[in-house]
Amino acid sequence: EMVKVTNPGKMAEDIATNFASGKIYADIIETQDQPIGMYSYMEDVKKVKSLGLQTNDWDSFLGDSATFKGVQYGVGFMMTQNTAISQAVMVFNRALAEQYGIGDLYQKVRDGKWDYSAFEAASKTISQKTGGKTKGLLQQISTTMNDLIFTNNVTLIGKDNSGYYFKHNDSNLLSALNFWSDYCKNGYMYEHNSEDYGASAAKLFMQRKALFMMTDYIGTSTWLNASMEDTYGVLPLPKGPNATNYTTVANTKYFMLTKANPNIEAAGKILVAIANRTGWDMKEWDTAQLETALRDEESLEMLNKYILPAPAISPYKARTGLTTSFTTAIYEIIHENKSAAQKLQEIRGAQNASILEVYK
């Protein structure tokens, strides 16, 4: 029986209410990101023998994303390709790039030179040559910065002998924020604030409002492939000056099992069956991507060689313990002309208090 969740924000409360009364809300809970409030009602999946965590090839990134304080509360799939739909990619208008002499961006990636500097140079070229009609990057600023900072080898939360703390003065973080702040102030960002996030962004991208658009990979098949007249390409996110490798940023979705459930081993078997049925033969995978999501062989190469194998970051997990004032601070760094160091110092106390509460 399927439990239809009409109010996702209330699901943790409903699970707790059922648990307190000795009832099982659902055998299997599918969730996105890291639902800390639900963990006390979920089982450590390493204790569920039917899942076979030691023998089955469960996706390690999703397993890590579902781990909190050393306990793994969820599993995802058994093939890296199945996480691709939620991984962030940088889509570019290939027709515009060729028209305005942007150069071979695929080769930049192959040469390890697809970095902040190359991204800014391409954005500057398209902005100048179109008289500002086409910007560099199309995205919501707060969302973009919250994800793109991780491409500069950034960690937001540290740990010392006193416990966990907010790394407000981390040099990699400040470097990333200052770069993207300057990028936006230079006029290379096309902002949009529609609630219909993905669809509206794709529509503007197809109208040539920007050369680049950052989106989850699934956005290529959902919004672009069937409707976009111009040819587009897919690239990894550009790497920052403090990063050695390209980094993929992904919103994580995984499955958890309710604690104290007499049917928990049967539920584990169901998850194994689901995972096995969602495997891909690589030849089949390549064909499907070219038919439904990609327009050229080079983009498939980018996906298979530089995006899927790249070190993955779950932004939600990386921000665990931080409050919404962190996202607000990033926005204000860009729009209120405050230095990154100054603004992060202002919110340091509140972030440390929140982190200590979460990790206590």
Image (cartoon, rainbow, N blue to C red):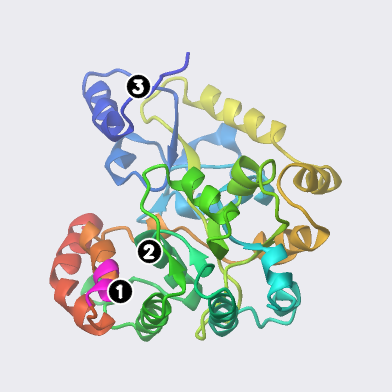
Q: Compared with residue 294, is residue 26 higher up or lower down, i.e. above or below?
A: above
Q: Secondary structure at mark 1?
A: helix
Task: Estimate the spatial distance between the alpha carbons at disc 3 and disc 2, rounded to whole Å.
Answer: 38 Å
Determine the residue located farthest toward the front in the rendered image.
131
Determine which quarter of the picture holds residue 339.
bottom left
Q: Amino acid at mark 2?
A: Ile
Distance from disc 3 to disc 1, alpha carbons, whole Å, reads 43 Å
Q: Which label lies toward us, 3 or 2?
A: 2
**Residue 177 placement (x, y as % from top left):** 37, 78
Q: Is residue 246 left or right of residue 356?
A: right
Q: Nearer the viewer, residue 122 or 142?
A: 122
Q: Which residue is mark 1?
A: 334
Q: Residue at x 55, y 85 (%)?
A: 117
Q: Tell me the tag on residue 25.
A: 3
SS at circle 2: helix
Magenta extent: 331-336
- Nearest the eye: 264 or 168: 168
Which part of the image, by quadrant, shows the C terminus? bottom left
Is there CB contact under 8 Å for labels 1 and 2? yes
In this view, the residue farthest toward the right is 283
Q: Amino acid at mark 1?
A: Ile
